[in-house]
Image (cartoon, rainbow, N blue to C red):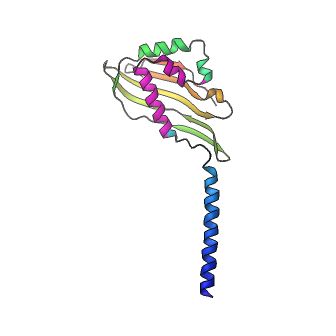
């Protein structure tokens, strides 16, 4: 009798485990986006474009709506002139984020990396903050960087683009 109950318990446990595995892995076919990893990647990319005067690289990071601005090329050129030198050190960035999930799928993800104390070989110090809608299911034309704010040690700002609401 005890052996029969043990066998039934093992079978029930096995079925429960199988169901759990099947149900739990049903969500894995959706892309997972880690806002911290994505923020770090985008920060490195943007800082590389700034220090290498790469206007096309910066423009490629922008969302469709921001890229279509009639003054965007001029704004990028002004930013590249404003940011002087190659980066020699910087603080770790702060990456606040906002996320909305529906039925297990990310429908909105915004991150706002903020990199402080960026020192360059031209003896300049900057802060760079930018806003990125990584996912926007309602308005995909807003996916990408919408605004970049570069501030120097004197508090002067150079802004590329404009912050876009959801």
Above or below: residue 22 compared with residue 112: below
Above or below: residue 97 compared with residue 125: below
Question: Total label count?
Answer: 0
Q: Is residue 153 left or right of residue 159?
A: left
> Dividing the picture into quarters, in which one does residue 16 lie?
bottom right
| Percent position of residue 38, x then y | 50, 36
Range covered by the magenta-colored residues: 36-63
Q: Which quadrant, please, contains the N terminus?
A: bottom right
**Residue at x 57% of width, y 38% of height:** 98
Above or below: residue 2 compared with residue 17: below
| Percent position of residue 148, x then y | 50, 23
| Percent position of residue 130, x then y | 50, 27
Depth order, front residue of 3/83:
3
- Residue furthest to the bottom in view is 1
| Percent position of residue 152, x then y | 40, 20
Residue 13 colored in magenta in the image: no
> Dividing the picture into quarters, in which one does residue 138 lie?
top right
**Residue at x 58% of width, y 31% of height:** 133
Depth order, front residue of 46/118:
46
Give the prevailing secondary structure in the magenta stretch: helix
Depth order, front residue of 155/139:
139
Q: Is residue 20 left or right of residue 40?
A: right
> Dividing the picture into quarters, in which one does residue 166 lie?
top right
**Residue at x 65% of width, y 63% of height:** 19
């Amino acid at each position: 009798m005890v052996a029969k109950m043990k066998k039934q318990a093992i079978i029930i446990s096995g079925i429960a485990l199988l169901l759990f595995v099947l149900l739990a892995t049903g969500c894995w076919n959706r892309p997972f986006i880690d806002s911290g990893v994505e923020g770090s990647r985008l920060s490195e990319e943007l800082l590389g474009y700034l220090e290498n005067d790469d206007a096309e690289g910066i423009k490629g990071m922008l969302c469709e709506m921001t890229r279509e601005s009639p003054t965007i090329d001029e704004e990028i050129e002004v930013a590249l002139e404003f940011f002087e030198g190659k980066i020699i050190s910087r603080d770790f960035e702060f990456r606040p984020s906002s996320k909305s999930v529906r039925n297990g799928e990310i429908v909105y993800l915004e991150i706002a990396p903020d990199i402080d104390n960026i020192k360059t070989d031209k003896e300049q110090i900057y802060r760079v903050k930018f806003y990125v809608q990584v996912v926007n299911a309602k308005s995909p034309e807003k996916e990408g960087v919408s605004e970049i704010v570069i501030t120097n040690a004197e508090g002067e700002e150079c802004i590329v683009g404009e912050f876009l609401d959801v």
